[in-house]
Amino acid sequence: MAATISSNPGVLVYPGGQRLMYGFTTSTTITSDFRFVVQVFEFNTTEIGKFYLTPNTNDTSFFDLSQVIEGRLKRDIVDNSGDALWGATLPFAQSPQNSKGYQVRVGEFVAGVETLNQDSDDIYLINGYMQQRLGLNPGFADYYPTASTKKVWLTDKSSVSDVISYKMSAEDEAVFGFLYNDITGGSASYVRQQIFDGTGLLATVFSTISVANGSNLPSSAAFVAGGTLVYASVGPSNVLSRNPTWPTLYPDWTKMESVVINGSFAVIGSVLKITRDCSTPKNTPTQMAFSNSVGGYDYIRWDGRRVQNLTKQDKSYRPLQGTWDAASFTIDPTGSDTAIYQKDVTERYALNALMSSVDFPLLGIAFRSRQIFIKIGADWLPCTLAESSLQIQSEPISKLTAVSVTAEISQGVRC
């Protein structure tokens, strides 16, 4: 006579931002005081919730795990050294905030007696979300590294013929997440990075998924913090800084390609292709990174004019000038009759770009994102996008879309 888990999300690794429904049934005869006792554990060790559920008229109860873990998963923003994640110098960076393991246990409370953990289920969640229009338990297996036809890279950008394409300059930084634990059914062991010019392949480097390279081991239990998801630092600037001879040896490189491979050196995911932007715009491009819906980061490059705007709010008072506590009274001729005791400055940037039909959908993801950063100089700064500032204008001749938006820096300017 025991409670059992009759239904669950049906996956091992999943975004945690949509409904994660569990159903419970029992072989015990239901009485008026019967309750299902549901416990939720993080990393299989720390109890974060205990709930007593009354059965419905079908002697069943349902439980939404997403309501319990909301706010516990956060997109990582620093690498293993505590520096901005996107500039990671090691091949990989761990994800202690973004991937966590949970265990749901169910027991019974009958006639004043509580019996715990009669059945349990493990699930490993990342900070992402799926839309309700996709149904109750939409599949996520396309992100499991099991075959070259799988998308694998945690990006909202579409894969075309198993290739995900970005355009970046040699100075651009970027990390892309992927699931690498063996529980996905895959066996990710390396990330292969290749650099090309117009004549073909120039060089290849294999980065082992290892502690020395910034990651947990692939076989680490997912109940270890960050044991499911890892970020690969495959932006042009990241790759070139790890291979300092490449800029000299291959000054005319045209693209870089990164793929996840297994221990037999077979490709088990889509190709992440970064084409070099060799244009020389008169304006300094602005790189934007933002959390996407599948647990990673996506990027928009704003090549147009960037305009800084500072606005201030302050409180002031008019002090009485003079040496009031002195033997003789004097006045400072350079003194001010206005003193400021509180001053707040807001920093905003107007960003502009011409976007293709391939890049334009990412703009909608950026506006839904809870974490947005722009790179100003060498610094990645958190910001929000002002919806009222968005302007879109089609360019029928070039088949591009002119987009402008204002990003407000989420850090105050000290004065």
Image: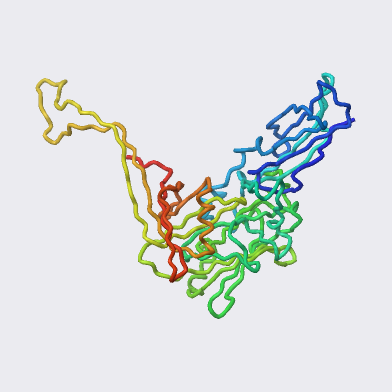
x and y, in percent, of residue 257 in the image? 59, 68
Quick check: 245 above or below 333? Answer: below
- In this image, 319 relative to 241: left or right? left
| Residue extending farthest bottom | 199
Give the total of numbered labels.
0
On screen, residue 388 versus residue 107, left or right, reads left
Q: Is residue 373 visible?
A: yes
Quadrant where the C terminus is found in the figure: top left
Q: Position of residue 388 (x, y in %)?
A: 42, 48
Image spot of residue 234 (x, y percent)? 57, 61
Q: Residue at x 31, y 33 (%)?
A: 342
Q: Quadrant of residue 166?
A: bottom right
Residue 377, can we see it? Answer: no
Give whichever of 414, 283 is nearer the camera.
Answer: 283
Left or right: 413, with 102 as reference point? left
Closest to the observer, 89 or 266? 266
Which quarter of the rendered picture does the N terminus lie within?
top right
